[in-house]
Image: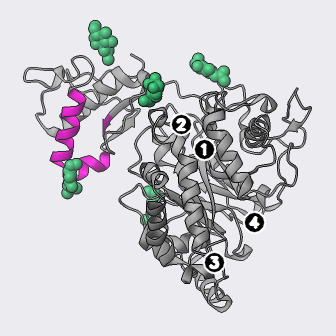
Amino acid sequence: MAASMAGVSPLRPLLFLLLAAFACHAADGSTSRYGHGHGLGVNYGRVADDIPSPRRSVQLLRAAGAGSVKIYDANAPVLRALAGTGLTVSIMVPNEIIVDLAASYAAADKWVADNLLPYLPRTLIKYLLVGNEVLSDTSAANTTWPRIVPAMENLHRSLRRRGVSRVKLSTTLAMDALVTGAFPRPPSAAAFRPDIAEAVVRPLLRFIERTNSYYFVDAYPYFAWAGSNGTVPLDYALFRGGDGAIRYVDPGTGLAYTNLLDEMLDAVGAAMSKLGHGGVRLAIAETGWPNAGDYEQIGASVRNAATYNRNLAARFARNPGTPARPGARMPVFVFSLYNEDLKPGPGTERHWGIYYPNGTAVYPIDLAGRRPLWAYPPLPVPENDAPYKGPIWCVLAAHAAQKLNETAVGDALTYACGQGNGTCDAIQPGGACFQPNTGAAHASSAFNSYWQQLRKTGATCYFNNLAEQTIKDPSYGSCKFQSSLG
Ligand SMILES: *[C@@H]1O[C@H](CO)[C@@H](O)[C@H](O)[C@H]1NC(C)=O
Ligand SMILES: *[C@@H]1O[C@H](CO)[C@@H](O)[C@H](O)[C@H]1NC(C)=O
Ligand SMILES: *[C@@H]1O[C@H](CO)[C@@H](O)[C@H](O)[C@H]1NC(C)=O
Ligand SMILES: *[C@@H]1O[C@H](CO)[C@@H](O)[C@H](O)[C@H]1NC(C)=O
Ligand SMILES: *[C@@H]1O[C@H](CO)[C@@H](O)[C@H](O)[C@H]1NC(C)=O
């Protein structure tokens, strides 16, 4: 019953009241003067133990001028907090349940009944995205990959039967769906990987075309730039390549590019054309730039993150499309609302936020793109636009040392000592780093020994948020810490 009213717009007076309330909040260095409205979407990730409540998060979204929000699961408090806000909402269906939803219409229908219907129509659910970069996970090749489209079919049928006609279905794919990965140059030569093109992507594009939905891509110029070894100018990745100063001309089409994101989007378009579905519309499920990272990760800074996201907002406010698709309208979701402290991996993973966990803006931004760049306060000068060449060590993080959790540190020590060769020899009785005989001191020695041995094979200085990098030599007395320079 409620479902048949999906898509009815929220009560206008309520919306105005909310806007008025948020205008006060926005005075803290953000965007009230430039109004609120249909700005870029934001990914509201919650892999953190210290972020604000859903209600406060909605205020922060509005203060930044977000027009919509994308969430990674159908979290009930979040969906309730988004009710009546005017923000459109995209919900991701977790990878783990795709096989079940594909196997049974009843399971898909129950999922819709349990997770969507209670929030309609006051929560403006717009896209249901079945799976997060599933085609990047080769361990799911035989299980989940062939079930993505059948799960979408079942959910689609359930939504239609229940009269929810506004919600569109898709899935999100990373750039590694293309043969060439994150840097498919020239764009016109791009193609989908042979292991997925016919079996998965073709049926997916057919479904998207038939239901008039979008292909949702996660496109990160940051990674393509950082991996380009200086061959791509930073300005080109940050949308500062205009005025004919920095251009790339695709030899296949003669089209001129002024930024890396357009190249990535047109590469996806070219790959779709090769499968006979060049008319499928594109949406950007995730894009952004990290505001900080590890010492050896270049270009992750507040200045570059602010520049990328502000230019992105200003650009999409004009709906320029891309060189191959001029004027195309595209839903865009910036990653991410918060710096998320519990994301594993290198430091950049935990620093995509436009807000710190305490709700302070990392940098002011108007996601509606109306605030001119000159109207923002000055940004800090980045110190890491070129590779860092000095020594780096990995030690127990200061915040973890302050409130030492003996259990967690003990678990991390056990893990580290089980990896590599002689990782914990120095902290055995009689070893050079045995004294002081404390869990904290031993953890630093073991974390560093582990990381120095294994970082070349992708190990990170993280240990469930217990470790951090330092460029200050932690060696003392006869206890020598090996550095990243050997
Ligand atoms: C998928 O199935 C093929 C053929 O049976 C097999 O060779 C391959 O190892 C399987 N892949 C995974 C990830 O299980
Ligand atoms: C950059 O250098 C690395 C390491 O030498 C190499 O693996 C990678 O392919 C290079 N990338 C580009 C875009 O040249
Ligand atoms: C919020 O956190 C950031 C980053 O840790 C810090 O710089 C800032 O001062 C904090 N703001 C408040 C109001 O505590
Ligand atoms: C300490 O760490 C353990 C294991 O990671 C965890 O289960 C526990 O909740 C932590 N205790 C506190 C007080 O954070
Ligand atoms: C540990 O030693 C073995 C044998 O010398 C070697 O093959 C392996 O690469 C070493 N592992 C690390 C992490 O250095």
Q: Where is residue 313 in the image (x, y as percent from the top left)?
A: 73, 58
Q: How far apart are marks 4 and 2 (CA)?
A: 37 Å
Question: Callout 4, which amino acid?
Answer: Arg
Q: How far apart are marks 1 and 4 (CA)?
A: 31 Å
Label 2 residue SS: helix
> Looking at the magenta stretch, what is its main secondary structure?
helix
Which label's residue is closer to the chain start, 1 or 4? 1
Circles 4 and 2, Cβ within 8 Å, touching? The answer is no
Between 379 and 413, the residue placed more toward the observer is 413
Residue 86, which numbered label?
3
Question: Callout 1, which amino acid?
Answer: Leu
Q: Classify mark 3: residues with Cα within 10 Å, few (<14), some (14-19) or many (20+).
A: many
Which label's residue is closer to the chain start, 2 or 1? 2
Q: Magenta segment, which residues?
A: 395-417
Question: Callout 2, which amino acid?
Answer: Ser
Q: Classify mark 1: residues with Cα within 10 Å, few (<14), some (14-19) or many (20+).
A: many
Tell which tag, 3 or 4, sits nearer the viewer. Answer: 3
Label 1 residue SS: strand
Between 461 and 390, the residue placed more toward the observer is 461
Q: Name the residue under label 1.
A: 173
Q: Residue at (73%, 73%) from the top-left corner?
A: 34
Q: Classify mark 4: residues with Cα within 10 Å, few (<14), some (14-19) or many (20+).
A: many
Residue 29 magenta-highlighted: no
Which label's residue is closer to the chain start, 4 or 2? 2
Q: Mark 4 points at which residue?
A: 371
Q: Residue at (88%, 27%) from the top-left corner?
A: 252
Which label's residue is closer to the chain start, 1 or 3? 3
Which label's residue is closer to the chain start, 3 or 4? 3
Tell which tag, 1 or 3, sits nearer the viewer. Answer: 1
Between 168 and 222, the residue placed more toward the observer is 168
